[in-house]
Structures are given as C-alpha cells and as structure tokens.
Image (cartoon, coloured by chain):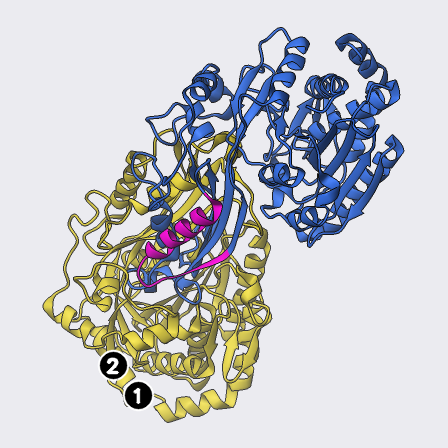
Chain colours: A blue, B yellow
C-alpha cells in the first residue's frame, strides 16, 4: 500500500505525460447539446476507449440514443471489492466564445492552471482519477475490481444512458459507486459532498403576433410577447425571493440538526463570494443562510430569455415570440415529475391574455441525492483526506446536480461516495474554464490513497 | 392639368420601366443601423442622385455624421409654390432572415406585389411619388418648385440629418412639406394622416455576476439578471396595461371631440386585425378604443430582451447580463426629453437588489405631430383623393413616428401634408415586406393629381 509520499513522487515522475494526455483529452470539442459536435463526442469516446485499453482495461463503446458510453472493467481477484467509477467526457457549450482568452479546445497551461472547456468539469477531475488508477496498476497496489462508466450526455439535460444501464445492470453491480465531479468548500478544505440537488428543465415559447409588428402602428393594440414573457417570468418568484409556483415546497425534507450544523460550520464568506462572482450572495429565501439555500432548498432559475431585437441601435418592433429557458433544482422530498408538472401548470395559468404558450422542451435530470453521515465509505474517505491535508475535512451539501448519481446507486446496488476538488475559480460552465495542476494532483492522490486502502468489501 | 385618366394611361405606358427602376432602388441593402452596410447606404444615395439628375433635378449628396442625404431641387417660375418632399432611402434590418421567402434585397414580383425590404417603407412609397413628379415634368404639368430631402437614417433612431437641415435652412424654405411614408386605414380607404406619435428609445443592460455562473452551485445565492430583467420590465406597466412610469401621462393632450369622432368613424375591426396580425387588439389601456390608443395615447414597448442561453437543450447558467431594448411612443403634450428622463429614472429606481443597471444607448426621435383639420393642404388633398376613389377619404391619427416630420415643418416654415398608401399586409419592419403595384400606382396618381393642381401659393 503506497504512502502519501510514494504517490506524490509517482505523480511528479509522470507529471509531464499526465499533462500531455490530459491536453489531448481536452482538445475534443465534445459539446453534447450541439448536434454538430456529435462526431467530436464519438471521437472523444473512442480516444478514451483506446486509452483505457492501453491502461489494462477491457473497454468498449456502447451506443445510446445520443452519444456513446465508454464501459470498461479491470477485474481483481474474485471476492475483491468492486468499485464503479462514473465520469463524463462531454462538456458545456462555449458561448459567449468572445470572452475566452484562449480557444476553449486548444488547452493552454498558464501559471499552473490548464485553461480549456472541460479542464475541470469533468474531463480534468475524471482524468486525475484515471491516472491514479493507472499508477496503482503499475505499482501493483490495486486490489479491487474497477468498473468505469464514462458517458457523453451529462451536460445535455437528458439521460439516454439510463436505458443502457438497465440493459447492462448485471455487469454493473458494485460495492461502492464513486465519482469525481464535485468541489471543495470555499476555504479549499478537502471536502466530501453529502448531497446534490435534483434538476428539471423547461423551454417555453410565448407567441403573440404571427410576425414581428411595427411598434408604432401596433403599440397599444397588439399584445407584446417580450413584455408578456417578462410578466410570466417575474410571476415565478414572489417579492421575497421565494418560488411562487403552487405546491412547489410540498414535502420538502428539512436537514437533520447535525447536517445543518455541519453545513453551516463552513459558512459562505460574503467578501470572498463577491470577489469570486461579482455579486453578494443575496438571492433566494432570506430566512435561510446561503449555505442552507443551496444545500437544502429548491430553486427555479432563469437560464435564458430571448425575444426580438438585440443588435445595435433600435429596431422598433413588437416581437412575434419570446422564449425562456428555465431549470429547477430539487431537494429530497420533491419528485421531478411533480415539480415539472407544477411549473408547467404555473406557466400555463399565468400566460398573459392574448398570447399562446407552448412548452417546446422539457426534461427530468433526476431527484436529489442525500448521503448518510453514517456511510462507511464516507468515514474511510475522511481518513484518507485528513492524511493528505492539514485542514480538517469538510462536509458539503452541494447545490449542483449530477442526475446520473441518483440512478447509478440503484443500478449498482451500492452507496455512493463523492469527493472532488473543483473550486469556484475554475469557472465551469463559463468562459475561461480552468483547473490547476494542484487540484489535479489532489484528485490523483486522494483516489490513489482511497483505492489502495480498499482491500475488503465494505 | 392632366386628368385622372390621363395620369392612369401615363402610368400604364411607363409601368415596366417604373418597376425595373424600383427594383434597382430596392436592391441596395441600405440598412442604416448596421455599420457594415454603410457603403451600401452610400451607393444607394449615389444611385438616387444620378437618377434625380437624369429626371432634371439639380441634385447633390451632403454628408452627415452618419449616412449621406440626397438634396435636390427643380425650380419653377419665381413665385410658384414651393413643395418640400421628404423621403428616406434607408431600410430596417432583415432579421429573422430565415423567415423570408425570397432574399430581401433581390426584389421579387409575385401576384402583383413587389417583395423586398423597403418595398413599401419607404423606397416604394417615395419612388411612386418621384415617378409622378417625373411624369408631370415630361407632360409639362409641373408648375411648382420641388425640393427633395431624401435621407438615410430614418430607421436608425437618431437624426444626424438635423445638423445638415439647420445648415441648409435657407435653401429649404417651402410652402408645404409633403411625405409619403404613411398608410391607409384598415378598410383601405384613401387616407390623410393627421397625427404621428413621437418616439424615444433606450437600451439598458442589467449586470449581476461578472461571468455566467453554474445555476446549481449558485441558484439560491447569486442574483439572476435574466429573472431581474423580467421583474424590471414587468414593472413598466401595471396590471391594467397602463404605463407605470411616474409622471408618464403628465400633460397628455386629449383629442378634440371632432378628432375623436373622425378617428372612431373608421373603427378597427377585431376580426380583420386578428387575421392580419394573429392577435386580438387587446393591449394597452382598456378605457380607450384601439383606434384611440394608437392615435391619441402614449405607450412604452419592449422591442427586445436578451439574456443567457437560447440554443437547443439546456445550459444551466445564471447569466451575467440581460439587455432590454425599449421604445416609447409619445403624443402631444409630452416632451421626448422629459419622457426619456422619467423612463430612465423608473429603470434605475426599480433595479432589483444586487444588480447594476447601465443605460448603454438612448435616443430621441422627436415629439408627436398633430395636424389641424383646418389646413388648406388637407382640404385640397381630400378633393384629389375623393376624385381618385369611390370611397370617401378617411382621417387617420397614426401610431407610428416619422421623427423628422416634427422637425421639417419648423425648418421649412410650412405646414405638413401626409398622404400614403401603406397597409398592414405590407409587413413593414418584418420578414417578407411587400408593396402592391396597385398601391404604388395609387401613390403615383395622388401625387400627380395633387401637384398638378398646385399652381398658386396656398
């Protein structure tokens, strides 16, 4: 079993190769929501399959209704613990592209950070874990069976992978599900993520006139969908910031006093938040702390609104249509189907007079995940993290969603462990996404240490 | 002095040439708001100048801070009446381009209608009048001095022409200002436009986070500018459709009982309106008829809202910014400066917490125009129109704005006459703009008849 120091020197020896391979992985524009990038997603998956085969895995591509999934396995002795590791090779879109300092798919290493779309989310975090597994294979310290599920639709808001997982269910049984797609608390302390929010999304189009109208001739006559959409969207929240969709909070499970106390033990520093984002953390329900609002409370967010003219100067029209893209983050006690239905009903009942609403897209990610503080894997991960850092391990109830992680534990019949090293300054889902070599190395060391200690079924 | 029949046979004789020249005029993509089309605006102005010179005008291009203005003059005997005719050769942008059946700058004649951007507004209406003047020159029936002001910034929401008009003021004195940039009432009856609304416009940007944020990590913390813009925009109107900007209606002049009665004598048929636009005419203040709302009441209209993601699928962000493009239509008693200031103050005082508002563009078109029912030119135009049609002439208080027409009468020291033949089905400012040969011919006949009767100073 390698020590922390042995793993560190292993990392330093191979560091240049790791970075080179990581850059190769990042250079595929595997944007899952953009149909024109489907061939890039496939090329990226093929690259991964070959890479894993060279690492000693039995690896294959499996088709889905969308992008292929990489399934891989490396067997240890029968009776050895089985770890199912999940990651995704697809990335977010890159717009607004003009705000990137270097092209998003030409990875650029500057001042110890790798800049590229996917540098962290999830190619960077996932690849650090894969390299740790490779290092343990080389040093002979890997004593568990590793199963890998690396998919290409995590960022697309739908899950064609589910049908595949059902089909492959017998091959995916495990003792523990792991993923490295989470972050650390604001202080940077090593962090175990104890919860994720669920997610649904909706695209709604409001139609008024059947073509753009002259705003002089028709202003004061024709219903204006841009103004109507503003009304409709503003009806989603009340003046206090609470979601105004009827029944939205029905059944929401409150955290235990211990969960609440642990979450608030790493409070959000408003000054740090302002420096990192440009805003004060003042949105949402004022009766909860910012930590509680993202960890334990659901939200409805407006991801985009588009209607009419947006160019220079003025174009005096009443637009024919307005589109809104919404998502809701869910917590335990809410079911995605129910919230989707309630939100659509709200949009329908609040549609302004004279206009027509249509729901052009809708999707369910999955329900929320909340992990027990009593999980043996959580306790073991805490020991590994404590040995890697002088800072005590923090527990985080995360606001983000990794929908597949509410499904995979059911498929694998195993609990889930979420340890990741992302940070706010990584700018995931935004221009100039990056991930530092230090973070990459932390992911490598944790995975190496945790897996090398995993000799017996938990 | 030619009769209606003589003018009609003149038109039929030259019809093919008129259409050919009109198509040539329409083929310039003279979009004034788009900087990349500045050379096209200049080429269009040069084409006009040469065309007018061939018609017998002394014509020149005058530079402005934006696109050039064509100034032209054809002198009659000293003492003859002087008519200042105004038109514009610039056109609206063409987006959404994908909704055009034929390219906007490849004029296409189908079923008696010319399809092109500018087919009506204003190239078509203006060119019909120019051809009438040409016909009177050829037949020796033009007994007045004609001055032409044809500009290239009418659709751009600013008026670089004003500085030029001040400079050329001595050359622009006239007995009557005319323009053909208006339409007929819904029934299609020949129409004299008695009023135009004024206009201001504003572009406002609401900024929250300094980059797009992950809506999971930050939903419930970071103020969302897309949601904030929806709130801000919906605050501009109250639930009844009335503008909620403080002091917006201060000083608004009511129509005289005669004006109100004449306006309502051609009521808006809701069935016709629904067929023409796809909506019921239900926007605005319910205590006024639709005719009164556009003729005598001011509005604030949302011309566009843009924030965040708008592509396929979902992108789970809290956008960094949201932009809104607003315009207000003004009536007599409101001053543009005052309404601009009040609207900006409203936006500032209603900016949601945690976000920053900036006004990135603002502009004043001009105040409203209202023409007296006692004007001699109005009476004479009514006689000409009545002789051209079996339908009695209608009087229209128009909702649209031609800002220059509130300035030109002051410069020329003369009243204004507004007769035009536009119709709702022309789709001006929208995809598939068109103008029928019948409408073009009506403009030709009216201008010919009206001007040929103009022998003495009014």
Residue A456 falls inside the magenta stretch: no
Q: Is residue B117 left or right of residue B395?
A: right
Q: Is residue A80 left or right of residue B391?
A: right
Please identify the residue farthest to the top as the structure is shown. Answer: A390
Q: Please indicate, yes or no, whether residue B113 appears anywhere in the rendered image.
A: yes
Q: Which residue is mark 1?
A: B389
Q: Which residues are magenta?
A: A335-360
Quadrant hosting residue A322: bottom left
- The residue at 44%/26% (across/down) is A279
Q: Please state the chain letter of the residue tagged with numbered disc 2 in the rendered image.
A: B
Residues under numbered marks 2 and 1 in contact, where contact means CB atoms less than 8 Å apart: yes
Q: Please state the chain letter of the residue tagged with numbered disc 1 in the rendered image.
A: B
Q: Nearer the viewer, residue A286 or A407?
A: A407
Q: Which secondary structure lies at badge 2? A: loop
Please identify the residue farthest to the front as the structure is shown. Answer: A79
Label 2 in the same subunit as label 1: yes
Q: Position of residue B143 (x, y in %)?
A: 35, 78
- Spatial distance from mark 2 to mark 1, Cα to Cα? 8 Å
Quadrant hosting residue A218: bottom left
Picture layout, residue A161 above or below residue B398? above
Residue B217's label in the rendered image is none
Q: The C terminus of chain A lies in which quarter of the figure?
A: top right
- The residue at 44%/18% (across/down) is A258
Q: The N terminus of chain A lies in which quarter of the figure?
A: top right
Q: Please indicate, yes or no, whether residue B46 appears anywhere in the rendered image.
A: no
Picture layout, residue B444 above or below residue A112? below
Q: Nearer the viewer, residue B235 or B29?
A: B235
Q: Which residue is mark 2?
A: B393
- The residue at 27%/87% (across/down) is B391
Q: Which secondary structure lies at badge 1? A: loop
């Amino acid at each position: 079993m390698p020590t922390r120091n042995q793993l560190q020197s292993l990392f330093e020896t191979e560091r240049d190769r790791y970075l080179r391979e990581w850059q190769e992985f990042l250079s595929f524009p595997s944007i899952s929501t953009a149909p024109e990038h489907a061939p890039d997603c496939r090329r990226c998956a093929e690259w991964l399959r070959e890479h894993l085969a060279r690492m000693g895995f039995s690896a294959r591509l499996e088709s889905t209704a969308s992008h292929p999934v990489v399934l891989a396995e490396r067997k240890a002795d029968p009776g050895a613990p089985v770890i199912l590791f999940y990651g995704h090779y697809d990335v977010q879109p890159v717009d607004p592209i003009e705000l990137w300092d270097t092209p998003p798919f030409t990875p650029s290493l500057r001042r110890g950070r790798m800049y590229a779309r996917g540098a962290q989310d999830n190619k960077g975090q996932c690849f650090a874990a894969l390299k740790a597994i490779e290092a343990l294979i080389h040093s002979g310290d890997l004593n568990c069976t590793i199963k890998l599920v690396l998919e290409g639709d995590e960022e697309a808001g739908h899950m064609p992978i589910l049908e595949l997982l059902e089909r492959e269910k017998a091959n995916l049984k495990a003792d523990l599900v792991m993923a490295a797609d989470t972050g650390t608390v604001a202080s940077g302390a090593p962090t175990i993520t104890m919860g994720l929010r669920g997610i649904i999304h909706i695209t709604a189009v409001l139609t008024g006139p059947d073509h753009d109208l002259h705003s002089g001739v028709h202003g004061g006559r024709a219903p204006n969908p841009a103004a109507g959409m503003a009304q409709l969207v503003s009806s989603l929240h009340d003046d206090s910031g609470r979601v105004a969709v009827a029944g939205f909070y029905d059944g929401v499970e409150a955290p235990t006093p211990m969960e609440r106390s642990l979450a608030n033990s790493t409070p959000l520093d408003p000054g740090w938040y302002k420096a990192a984002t440009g805003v004060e953390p003042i949105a949402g329900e004022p009766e909860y702390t910012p930590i509680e609002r993202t960890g334990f409370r659901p939200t409805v967010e407006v991801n985009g609104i588009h209607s009419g003219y947006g160019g220079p100067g003025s174009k005096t029209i009443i637009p024919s249509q307005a589109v809104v893209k919404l998502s809701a983050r869910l917590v335990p006690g809410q079911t995605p189907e129910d919230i989707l239905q309630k939100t659509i009903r709200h949009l329908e009942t609040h549609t302004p007079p004279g206009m027509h609403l249509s729901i052009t897209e809708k999707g369910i990610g999955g329900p929320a995940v909340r992990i027990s503080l009593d999980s043996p894997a959580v306790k073991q991960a805490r020991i590994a993290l404590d040995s890697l850092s002088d800072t005590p391990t923090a527990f985080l109830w995360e606001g983000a969603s990794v929908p597949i992680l509410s499904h995979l534990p059911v498929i694998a019949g195993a609990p889930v462990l979420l340890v990741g090293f992302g940070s706010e300054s990584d700018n995931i889902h935004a221009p100039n996404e990056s991930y530092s070599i230090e973070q990459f190395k932390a992911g490598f060391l944790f995975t190496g240490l945790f897996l090398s200690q995993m000799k017996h079924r938990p």
